[in-house]
Amino acid sequence: MAAVASAVAGSGPDSKAVAIKVAPVDYPPKSLRAGEQGRVEYIFTVTARGKVKNCVVTKSTGFMRLDKATCELVGKTTYAPARTGGLPVAEDKTGVMNWRVSAPPVK
């Protein structure tokens, strides 16, 4: 089986969406073997230094391993912080990650 995961994070209509790089190796192995897949929604804070904190799943895939892996991947990403008056400030953002298992290509 092959695995694909994609994620986009943003916040509000004026926010730029940020794609999170997800490699097939990031798919939890037990979830891949079990065929677990789904869509997870989450919220997190980007600090004034561009680091992630407080990732919380707001809509689960129904699979704890995928939900946990989502916040782990989000936490590894660095963002450009929001700015107010030219100074960096913390900002809450939302995101969606889609976890998919696909059949191997037919030869």
Image (tube, helix red, strand yellow):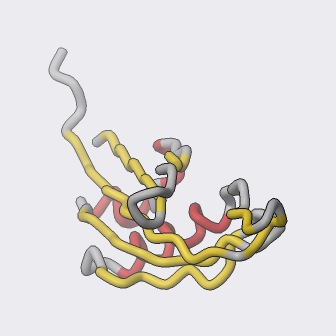
57 versus 100 height, above or below: below
Q: Which residue occupies the extreme top position in the image?
A: 107
Q: Position of residue 70 (x, y in %)?
A: 48, 67
Q: Is residue 23 depicted above or below 90 in this figure? A: above
Asked whether residue 25 is in view, the answer is: no
Side of 50 where 12 appears, left or right: left
Task: Work out whether residue 107 or residue 76 is closer to the camera in this orientation and state it.
Answer: 76
Residue furthest front as drawn: 85
Instruction: Give the left or right position of residue 47, taking residue 74 as reference.
Output: right
Quarter of the image for the C terminus: give it: top left
Which residue is depicted at the point 24% across and 64% down? 38
* x and y percentages locating residue 96 in the rendered image: 37, 63
Q: Is residue 16 something that shows in the picture?
A: yes
Q: What is the tally of numbered marks visible in this picture?
A: 0
Name the residue at 55% across, 44% down.
Answer: 21
Q: In the image as oriented, which residue stretches furthest toward the left?
A: 106
Q: With respect to residue 20, does 93 lie above or below?
A: below
Does 91 sit left or right of 100 as displayed?
right
Viewer-nearest residue: 7 or 88: 88
Where on the picture, by quarter, is residue 103? top left
Q: Residue 22, how many percent across, how many down?
A: 51, 46
Could you say where residue 92 lies in the image, as x and y percent from the top left?
56, 77
Please say if 92 is above or below 103.
Answer: below
Q: Quadrant of residue 84?
A: bottom right
For the point 68% across and 63% down, the residue is 82
Which quarter of the rendered picture does the N terminus lie within?
A: top left
**Viewer-nearest residue: 69 or 47:** 47
Q: Quadrant of residue 66?
A: bottom left
